[in-house]
Image (tube, rainbow, N blue to C red):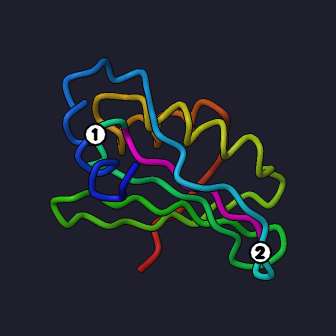
Amino acid sequence: MSHSQHIYDNFSQAAEPADKYSKVYSRDNTDGETLAYHNKSGTEFVGLRSRSPGRYQVVYDAVGGTRLLFDIKNPEANFEAIDDALREGVTARKVLVGVLNALKTRHIDFDTSP
């Protein structure tokens, strides 16, 4: 499948139920672990990146131009719990609200980055 066909397919499925997401990538790199997801329509993105060992940052980006960064405040929050929150949140109709609620449900404290 061509790249343009993949993009078209993502946008053409916008009417599908909001309980689906598309995993963009998952990899280990020299800077730390990174995970990223798009909602099924491809219009919103959430990602998790490691700023330094044990310090994580959530990235939210929407096609409309909204980009927000959230630093995870509690160092005891583990990568898997944060990833679970992102996967849950990206399935919500309002992805940003879904992600924030999923983090709060797991008692993962965060702060917005300047």
Q: Earlier in the sequence, mark 2 or mark 1?
A: 1
| Mark 1, other Cα within 10 Å: few <14 / some 14–19 / many ≥20 | some
**The residue under label 1 is which amino acid type?**
Asp
Residue in the image at 80% along x and 50% along y = 78
Element type where label 1 sits in the image:
helix
Task: Tell me: residue 99, above or below residue 3.
Answer: above
Residue 94's x, y, as percent? 29, 35
Q: Could you tell me if the residues under marks 2 and 1 are in contact, i.e. CB atoms within 8 Å?
A: no
Q: Could you say where residue 89 lies in the image, as x and y percent from the top left?
A: 47, 35
What amino acid type should be assigned to the residue bearing mark 2? Asn
- Left or right: where 63 falls relative to 27: left
Q: Which image quadrant for residue 63?
A: bottom left
On the image, the x and y values in percent for residue 98 come to 41, 34
Q: Which residue is mark 2?
A: 29
Q: What x and y, as percent, mark residue 42?
A: 31, 47
Q: For the point 54% across and 44% down, which residue is it?
A: 23
Question: Label 2, label 1: how many angstroms apart (C-alpha)?
Answer: 29 Å
Q: Which residue is pictured at 24% across the width and 63% down the height?
A: 66
- Between circles 2 and 1, the one closer to the viewer is 1
Q: Nearer the viewer, residue 19 or 27?
A: 27
Mostly what secondary structure, the magenta segment?
A: strand
Query: Split into 4 quadrants, where in the image is the C terminus?
Result: bottom left
Determine whether 33 is above or below 23 in the image. Answer: below
> Looking at the rendering, which quadrant does residue 93 occupy?
top left
Q: Which residues are magenta?
A: 32-39
Crowding around mark 2 (Cα neighbors within 10 Å: few <14, some 14 to 19, many 20+) is few
Q: Nearer the viewer, residue 25 or 70?
A: 25
- Residue lying farthest front? 1
Q: What SS does tag 2 mark? A: strand
Specify the label residue 22 is tagged with: none
Residue 9 numbered mark, or none: 1
| 86 drawn magenta | no
